[in-house]
Image (cartoon, grey):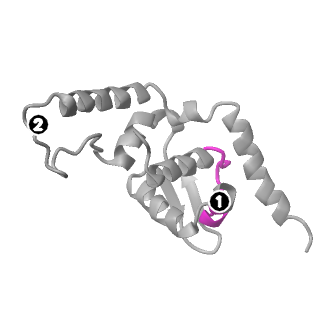
Amino acid sequence: MQLTHFTDFGLRILIYLTGVPDGEVVTIKEISAQFNVPQNHLNKIANRLGKLGWVEATPGRNGGLRLNIEPASLLLGDILQTLEGHPALVDCEKPACALKGNCNLKRILDLGLRDFFAAMNQYSLADLTQSPTSDVIARMHFQPRSLSARPH
């Protein structure tokens, strides 16, 4: 299974937001610069994460994003399944398959996908952001602030 860009970038947003200190927010512009992903694409993803209740968006000039859920309570399998939807590993309709209804492939692949999501649910967002990831996130958060603090 290959993740869509939507899911990949959604995970990056969530991981990055775990490093935001309490009471602070980060902008889509900052996340875009850190991961080299277009802001328009990140806006759509952040909007979805907000509707899910995982991210809080503060509007306005000093607004931005922050995580709205404890990282340990957000399970990786649930994140993947929610952002990916219900992916089919094989499409029996297009093109129409002569084995449809008489083939075990789809059923077995569906079981494997179910087991994949269950295995991923053994990990949470908190697990994803342990060291060394947390060390890199901390440096990423420090870098934009230190650059913007320099005199022009």
Q: Position of residue 147 (x, y in %)?
A: 84, 62
Q: What's the residue type where badge 2 is placed?
A: Leu
User: Does residue 59 sit above or below 15 in this rendering?
Assistant: below
Q: Which residue is mark 2?
A: 99
Q: Is residue 103 magenta?
A: no
Q: In the image as oriented, which residue stretches furthest toward the left?
A: 101
Looking at the image, which is closer to me, 46 or 36? 36
| Viewer-side label of 1, 2 | 2
Report the span colored magenta. 18-32
Q: Position of residue 18 (x, y in %)?
A: 60, 44
Image disc number at residue 36? 1
The quadrant the C terminus occupies is bottom right
- Label 2 SS: loop
Q: Position of residue 123 (x, y in %)?
A: 48, 28
- Residue at position x 65%, y 70% in the image: 62
**Alpha-carbon neighbours of circle 1 within 10 Å: few (<14), some, or many (≥20)?**
few
Q: Position of residue 7 (x, y in %)?
A: 45, 49
User: Does residue 85 sit above or below 31 in this rendering?
Assistant: above
